[in-house]
Structures are given as structure tokens and as C-alpha cells.
Amino acid sequence: DGGITQSPKYLFRKEGQNVTLSCEQNLNHDAMYWYRQDPGQGLRLIYYSQIVNDFQKGDIAEGYSVSREKKESFPLTVTSAQKNPTAFYLCASSTPRTSNTHSNQPQHFGDGTRLSIL
Amino acid sequence: AQKITQTQPGMFVQEKEAVTLDCTYDTSDPSYGLFWYKQPSSGEMIFLIYQGSYDQQNATEGRYSLNFQKARKSANLVISASQLGDSAMYFCATNMNTGFQKLVFGTGTRLLVSP
């Protein structure tokens, strides 16, 4: 079945450590996104990528980095510069909106990774 | 700037009854989409329904329908015949009028369906 796979489901980070969250999709989507969700809040955009080898910062990119070397993969690294990394991280993908239509394609999400500090 | 407001932190409904979850938005874009997602306790985000700003009719998907009032900038989700499995967080979101789907989410409404 087509979908988005995030791993690991749970992740623990030590002080000063970088950790990488995996996101793989087999939906043949061009666009991929990383969101952060804190308790009782909605999702906030960290980074997004519209095409391979290209990505842009979202609203809360500080302390995070990404790469997009393959269409299927969009890993997120939480660096030691991110002082409050404990959160639920969700990866999503979508087809890009076409220019000749007002149709908007929904984003499809993975099951998420819960990151905590040791 | 865009903003999504969900004013109901929690809602209760009895099984088999209908419930309306409120969502208002503020955007200066003439072309936009409105999305509703369901988030069960397990955490995944499940897409439910979409409404485009130019769509003439309210969107429906099974038991879900969207009460879209463009002049009032509201896009309320109506769930008919509630089921116990509908208990979850529900998020309203909107996108920018660009070539990609940057979504801005509301803070969500927690729905509890009782037997």
C-alpha cells in the first residue's frame, strides 16, 4: 500500500546530541513537509521541500536541518541548537498544486515520531 | 498573514447524534483551500474533507460535511450520526495561494462521543 513511513516511533535525545528522524514516502509526491506538534497545540511547519535537492525554511526552522537527495526521502535532523526539542514530529507529502486550477491537494501524513530528552 | 481559529477546545456528543465543529479563518488570498483533519490518540493525522474557496457547493464526504460560509469566513465541520470511533482531535487548516501546500493549522477541538 502507498503511504508515508516515519521512524522511529519513539526517540530519545541526550544533551548536545543530534538526532535524525526518518520519513519515506511511496506516493510519488513531489512535495514533502515536516511539522512539529506540542501538547494541546496545532501543527507548525519546520521545513518543506517542493522538489528534489531543494527545500525551504518554515515557521520554526531554527535548530533543525533537512536534506532532499531522493524524491522518496526527507529526513529531519534535530540539532543540539534546538533547546526544546521534546515534541511530536509529523512528516507529510502532497502533489503540488497545479497552476491552471484552483484544486488543492491534501497533505498525507505519517504516523509521527515522539522525541523526548533524556 | 493567515489565521485559523477553532474556539471550541472540547465538545461532547452522544452516539448517533450530529455535531458541528467550528472553524473561522482570516486570509487575504482570493484563492485558498480549507481542510479538516482528524487526529486519534495514536497521533496520525487523517485527512477528512476539503473545501475550495471557489467551490459553489459545500463539500461532503460520507458522514462529514463542511458548512462553508465564505462571507463569514467560516468552514464548520458537521459530523452526522456520531460513532464512538469519532472521538479524537479535529484540526481545521488552510493553505496559502502558492504553488505548494503550506498549511496553517488551528489549535484543534477535542471531540468525545459517549454511548
Image (cartoon, grey):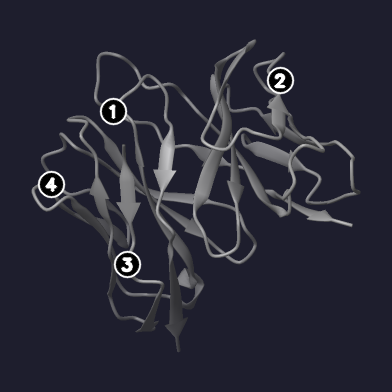
Chain letter for the residue marked with disc 1 in the picture: A
Residue labelled with disc 1: A103
- Above or below residue A8? Residue B24 is below
Q: Nearer the viewer, mark 3 or mark 1?
A: 3
What's the distance in space between the residues labelled 3 and 2, CA to CA?
37 Å
Q: First in sequence, mark 4 or 3: give its number.
A: 3
What's the distance in space between the residues labelled 4 and 2, CA to CA?
39 Å
In the visual, does B66 lie left or right of A73?
Answer: left
For disc 2, the neighbor class at 10 Å (few under 14, some 14 to 19, many from 20) is some
Residue labelled with disc 2: A67
Q: First in sequence, mark 2 or 1: give its number.
A: 2
Asked if disc 3 and disc 1 are in contact, CB closer than 8 Å, the reply is no
Residue labelled with disc 3: B7
What amino acid type is highlighted by mark number 4?
A: Lys
Element marked by disc 1: loop
What's the distance in space between the residues labelled 3 and 1, CA to CA?
28 Å
Name the spot of residue B51 as percent of width and height, x first.
Answer: 26, 43
Q: Nearer the viewer, mark 4 or mark 3?
A: 3
In the visual, does A118 lie left or right of B18?
Answer: right
The residue under the point 74% across, 41% down is: A82
Give the residue furthest to the bottom. Answer: B115
Asked if disc 2 and disc 1 are in contact, CB closer than 8 Å, the reply is no
Element marked by disc 4: loop
Q: Which mark is residue B70?
A: 4
Name the spot of residue A99 as percent of width and height, x first.
Answer: 30, 14
Chain letter for the residue marked with disc 3 in the picture: B
Q: Is residue A111 visible?
A: no
